[in-house]
Image (cartoon, rainbow, N blue to C red):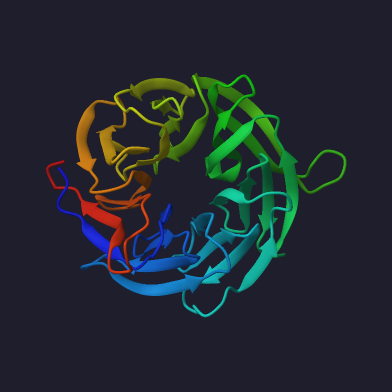
Amino acid sequence: MFGAPTELAGHVKAAPHLEWSCDGSRLLSGSDDRSVLVWDVSGRGAQVGSLQHHARVDALALAPHSPHLLVSCADKKCCVWDLRSKDCPISVFTVSTTSDVLNCAWHTGGNLVTTGNKDDVLAVADLRKSRVVKRTKFAFEVNEFRFAEGGSRIVASAGPKDGAGSLAVLALGEGEVGGGGWSLSTVANLVAHTSSALCVALSPDERRLALGAADSLVSLWSTRNMVSVGCVGRLEAAVHSVSISHDSQWVASAPKSPLVDISDAATGAHAETLALRAGSAACVRFHPTSPLLAYSTSDKPASARDACVFVRSMSPSS
């Protein structure tokens, strides 16, 4: 099903954050070594850029409308970059005042970025103003999230205070009652796991959703009526990253184990296990338009010549 991996060497510490540009021409990896590396994977995987930070990179989000723009989060700040001018970010602003950023997503409209921190505060930032325009503290644990329905909804992996894991659906709206601005509210909190949900992925057509949790399960959802229709139940460790392929056929899961699991995105049926040489899987990301999978491992590379980021292609018969 998958060919041999292309190894991307350049980081000197683990790279737990991976994202593809919207057109798939570049893969970006954010690392504990305070850098975001830019890769061209069309050949043997050439490094074509390096964006330096003053602290470890905590989150990445790439623009849904431009292959050149990205946001990286480090030391409670957002850095907005244009890959055509690589020397320094085009803007930097503080998004979290209390704790480090955990997750970041770029609104489908192009002008907003939302971040979430360790205190379960979601901050909506207007990139035109380079500042946060709305902060909302939630009463439950909010982990990875994605925009849906044209940006009017946020789907989030979550953990209510009773310890169960859930899929939270949030509404983002402009024109808050009583004073203008933005509003962010909970529409639904659907319990699905026995412990915190840690990661979430939407298929490109938004018909399927995958939710990974600390109970080692990945629940598979139909977004038409927001019901769980399948499950990946053979993993033996907490799942920290999930991704759905460009054709909505496959789901990749990264448990805290030396493997990446590939399953049918509709049923959870096993398709393939990608064994890792060392460490556990940290992040998985399918290419937006092609049968390619990028993944990273949790181990620190022995040197900059050793890879912790890998790309594999799927065979045409898959």
For the point 41% across and 56% down, the residue is 15
Closer-to-camera residue (119/69) = 119
Q: Is residue 227 above or below residue 259?
A: above
Location of residue 31 in the rendering, given as x and y in whole percent from the top left corner: 45, 60
For the point 49% across and 35% down, the residue is 198
Total label count? 0
For the point 58% across and 28% down, the residue is 159
Q: Is residue 232 above or below residue 273?
A: above
For the point 86% across and 45% down, the residue is 179
Q: Would residue 108 appear left or right of 20 to someone viewing this image? A: right
Residue 72 in view of the camera: yes
Toward the right, the furthest residue is 178
Residue 249 in view of the camera: no
Closer-to-camera residue (257/314) = 257
Q: Which of the image's four quarters has the N terminus?
A: top left
Closer-to-camera residue (112/89) = 89
Q: Quadrant of residue 238?
A: top left
Q: Is residue 1 above or below residue 106?
A: above
Location of residue 236 in the rendering, given as x and y in whole percent from the top left corner: 33, 27
Q: Which of the image's four quarters has the C terminus?
A: top left
Toward the front, the furthest residue is 302
Q: Would residue 300 appear left or right of 35 to someone viewing this image? A: left
Location of residue 39 in the rendering, given as x and y in whole percent from the top left corner: 34, 67
Closer-to-camera residue (95/16) = 16
Location of residue 264 in the rendering, given as x and y in whole percent from the top left corner: 26, 31
Q: Is residue 174 above or below residue 109?
A: above
